[in-house]
Each structure stands twice: as C-alpha cells, then as structure tokens.
Image: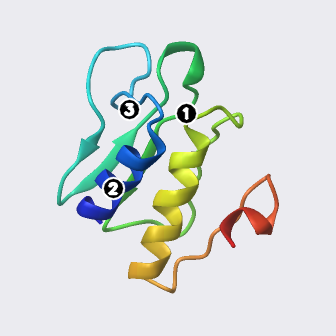
Amino acid sequence: MQRETRKIISSLNIPLRGPLSDEPGRPIINDKKIAFNGVEDEGNESFVLTKRGFDFEFCKTARKEYDAVVVEVLKAAREVNPDIELSSDGGPEVFQ
C-alpha cells in the first residue's frame, strides 16, 4: 500500500499534510499506517488507514480537495483486501 499511496499522491498532485492540517508535516506513509489531511482550510478530518482496522471507521472530508486522494487510497486498499466495505456520502459510484 505504501507504493500505491505514494503513486496516487504524486499523480493527483493535491497538497497534503500530515494528519493535522494546520501543522507542518508530510503525510505519514509507512508499514503501520497511512495518515494525511488537506492543508489548512482545505483540510477537515484526518484520514488514517492501518493494517489492523476496525469494524467501522470514517473520515469526513467535507468534499474538500483531498477527498479525491482518500477515495483513491481506499480503492487501492480494497484491491489489496477485497473484504473492505466502502461507502461514501457521495454515493456508491464514488468507489466504482
């Protein structure tokens, strides 16, 4: 997932920060987690994906620019683990 996430971030070219949108820092991409947010006013809730996972997790992006990165990373995660169930306020077509 690390390689896929870096490729997604690079190809979409959307400014990202670490999990805290108003503090300097880069997205966290390692073997334990992937975590990022939009930058300042383009941030909302932090996106965090771990290997461990939980029964239910969510990230409210307020449909800000970094939402596109969240969607693509989740689609890549589903390729790795087809058991991941994805949903979006934007409708099921978001993950097609």
Give the spatial CA distance, label 3 vs label 2: 19 Å
Please name whichever residue, 18 or 15, is drawn nearer the observer in this view of the structure.
15
Which residue matches tag 2? Answer: 7
Which residue matches tag 3? Answer: 19
Q: Secondary structure at mark 3?
A: loop
Residue 39 percent coordinates (x, y): 47, 21
Q: Secondary structure at mark 2?
A: helix
Quadrant in which the C terminus is drawn? bottom right
Q: Answer above or below: position of 86 versus 57.
A: below
Q: Amino acid at mark 1?
A: Glu
Q: Answer above or below: position of 46 versus 42.
A: below
- Left/right placement of residue 36 relative to residue 12 reads left
Q: Amino acid at mark 2?
A: Lys
Give the spatial CA distance, label 1 vs label 3: 8 Å
Q: Secondary structure at mark 1?
A: loop
Give the spatial CA distance, label 1 vs label 2: 22 Å
Q: Answer above or below: position of 84 versus 3.
A: below
